[in-house]
Image (cartoon, rainbow, N blue to C red):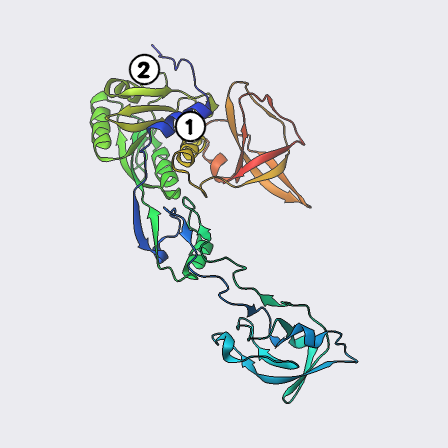
Amino acid sequence: MPRFLGKLISVEDAIAKLSDVLPNSLPSDIIELVNSLGLFSAEDIVARIDMPEFDRSAVDGYAVRAVDVQGATVNNPAVLKIIGIMKPGDKPDKHVIGPSEAVEIHTGAPLPRGADAIVMYEDTMRNDDEVEIYSPVSRYANVSRKGEDFARGSIIVPRGERIRAQHIGIIASNGIDKVKVYGKLSAAIISTGNELIEPGKPYVEGKIYASTGFLVKAYLEETGLFKADYLGIYPDDPGAVREALAYAVSRYDIVFTTGGTSVSESDIVRDVVEDMGEWVFRGVAMRPGRPTSLAVVNGKPVMLLSGYPVAAWTGLELILRKALIEKYGLQGLERPYAVAVLMRSLPNRVGYTSLIRVKLSIEGNKLYAEPYMLKGSGILSSLSKSNGYVVIPGHVEGYSEGEEIVVRLI
């Protein structure tokens, strides 16, 4: 006889309950900066220097005193004596400018002592060791001021920020070659089902190539927080599933199962987990992914995901991702979003949080979202052909065609 899920909890409650049973902290390590891409900073990274370290030229031209070129025009140029040249790498005190003097200067070179502005080449004419200035400039015109990019002691990468290429550049510009980053949790993925065969094996009529376990492994590793091992397919046999689960909880920080989570008599994972551990929740009021469940076995969280790939992905996206952010204070793990015009009405079953895949397109100066309308949590193309999704909260009956809605980008 089927064993029904019972009272479903909300997505928000599921996030909070998963957060509670995740490991209390992430491991951390100090690694070479060049190897930190995609990892999360385990501390505030603080600027060691001002950037720029000194006032420097933002253009090619002549360093001057602004007072010396006031009122300069093409018909009445200011004529200044050139006393030298400044190039990147020179020290600011290489030259000291006095009244009616100028220094030729290259972009990025330090402003010489006494100067307070730069006149671009385009507004000048050089005659031997003199230069005619055809346009006035205000103080610090065309000058990058000391510390305007970032000041010494300021936070350039906050703790919990995912390190991207631009972060590596700014860290390196401070002379920092090693960073403290969060390590990865170990995760095991167990797929179950007599109907499954591994990719690469000869096709058997009536069987299904396993895909959900591979999707889960890729999803976990894409977050930058997991080293995930796919343990393979296990038949709908209580002994085999029990052995696999016992192995996984003894060696990994967290375990994910796919399949066998629903209400039919063949859903073995549910029974084995119930016998070996304690339920945290059993089913979530969301579509797809309603059977998504959580248990604790041998002190380790075990997240039971649907065998259908889209439903499994939804459980990871709506619950796991949010729980990781909440638990560890991570930044850069949240999906970016855009506001788009809905091209088709989206009804919702009140009481359920629904995730609808959409395809975004640009027409004119507007962004439009076309819902991917193929039904079923096993339709993999709805993930591969969509580039965003809409979440309809449980208290909302739906969204109307033409309405502006928030789309999370994937």
- Which residue corresponds to the image point at 27% horizontal and 32% vertical from the top-left? 233
Q: Is residue 294 above or below residue 40?
A: above
**Quadrant of the image containing the N terminus:** top left
Disc 2 residue type? Glu
Residue 282 in sight in this render = yes
Q: Which mark is residue 92?
A: none
Query: Of helix, strand and loop, which one carries label 1?
Result: helix
Quadrant in the picture for residue 367: top right
- Which residue corresponds to the image point at 69% horizontal and 77% vertical from the top-left? 68
**Along the horizontal axis of the image, is 270 left or right of 334?**
left
Q: Is residue 46 above or below residue 259?
A: below
Query: Of helix, strand and loop, which one carries label 2?
Result: loop
Circle 1 residue: 15
Q: Is residue 184 above or below residue 175?
A: above
Q: For the residue carrying disc 1, how many other residues have a C-alpha within 10 Å: few (<14), some (14-19), or many (20+)?
A: many
Q: How far from the left and from the top, in percent, is residue 345? A: 63, 27
Q: CA distance from mark 1 to mark 2?
A: 28 Å
**Along the horizontal axis of the image, is 125 left or right of 226?**
right
Residue 206 in sight in this render = no
Give the residue furthest to the top.
1
Give the residue furthest to the right.
75
Disc 1 residue type? Ile
Quadrant in the picture for residue 365: top right
Circle 2 residue: 265
